[in-house]
Image (cartoon, helix red, strand yellow):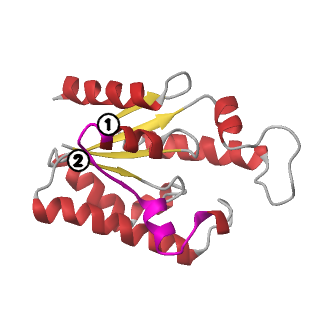
């Protein structure tokens, strides 16, 4: 079985992927892979994501998923960038989405939607207190979180709330839920 972690910024995708790596899983965080190539998501705001960054994220995700398909791999965890899908229209004609759904139907991939209370996400993303002009306003973050939560819920195998849980415990709980689904 392989895992795809999806969710809003600050839900713990990277941290949980790291914890799963400590348990023997092979972890891939698309944002970190692109950063090693000199492409940082910090250079773009979530609302004004450039097409260039978006296409790079999709390309890396497709390569990682294709690797699972071509080599019949298991125990891979992929942390998907938060805004790789922005709305339902992104799903309709998306080769990435179709690949994810195919792997789910073949029982090779479970999609885990990570959630957290909005106030916790705002704190985790540094949106508390005084803000500078270049920081994403809380209102925009709230709108994106609401839209993305509904979108990811539409194809996730299950949801996990990280509000009150450390990443190590979250990783353990997620693996238990995967076992329970099998």
Give the residues in magenta: 22-41
**Quadrant housing the C terminus:** top left
- Does residue 25 lie above or below 34 as drawn? above
Residue lying furthest front: 22
Please name the residue that numbered disc 1 is placed on: 157
Q: Residue at x 56, y 31 (%)?
A: 116
- Does residue 142 lie above or below 54 as drawn? above
Left or right: residue 142 versus residue 110 is: right
Residue lying furthest bottom: 52
Distance in Å between CA atoms under marks 2 and 1: 8 Å
**Quadrant housing the N terminus:** top left
Q: Residue at x 50, y 23 (%)?
A: 165
Q: Nearer the viewer, residue 70 or 17?
A: 17
Q: Nearer the viewer, residue 150 or 166?
A: 166
Q: Is residue 33 magenta?
A: yes
Left or right: residue 129 versus residue 160 is: right
Q: Residue at x 56, y 26 (%)?
A: 163
Q: Which mark is residue 169?
A: none
Residue 60 at x, y percent in the picture: 37, 68
Residue 141 at x, y percent in the picture: 70, 47
Left or right: residue 142 versus residue 41 is: right
Q: Earlier in the sequence, mark 2 or mark 1?
A: 2
Residue 118 at x, y percent in the picture: 66, 32
Residue 47 at x, y percent in the picture: 68, 61
- All told, the count of numbered labels is 2
Q: Are marks 2 and 1 in contact (CB under 8 Å)?
A: yes
Q: Which mark is residue 104?
A: 2
Q: Residue at x 61, y 28 (%)?
A: 117
């Amino acid at each position: 079985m392989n895992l795809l972690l999806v969710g809003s910024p600050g839900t713990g995708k990277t941290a949980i992927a790291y914890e799963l790596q400590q348990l023997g899983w092979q972890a891939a965080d698309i944002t970190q892979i692109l950063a090693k190539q000199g492409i940082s998501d910090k250079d773009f705001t979530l609302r004004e994501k450039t097409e260039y960054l978006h296409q790079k994220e999709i390309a890396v995700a497709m390569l990682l998923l294709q690797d699972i398909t071509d080599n019949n791999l298991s125990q891979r965890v992929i942390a998907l960038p938060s805004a790789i899908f922005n709305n339902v229209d992104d799903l309709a004609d998306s080769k990435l989405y179709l690949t994810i759904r195919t792997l789910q139907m073949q029982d090779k991939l479970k999609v885990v939607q990570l959630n957290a209370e909005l106030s916790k996400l705002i704190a985790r993303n540094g949106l508390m207190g005084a803000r500078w002009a270049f920081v994403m306003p809380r209102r925009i973050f709230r709108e994106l979180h609401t839209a993305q939560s509904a979108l990811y819920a539409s194809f996730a195998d299950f949801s996990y709330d990280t509000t009150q849980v450390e990443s190590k415990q979250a990783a353990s709980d997620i693996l238990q839920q995967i076992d329970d689904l099998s």
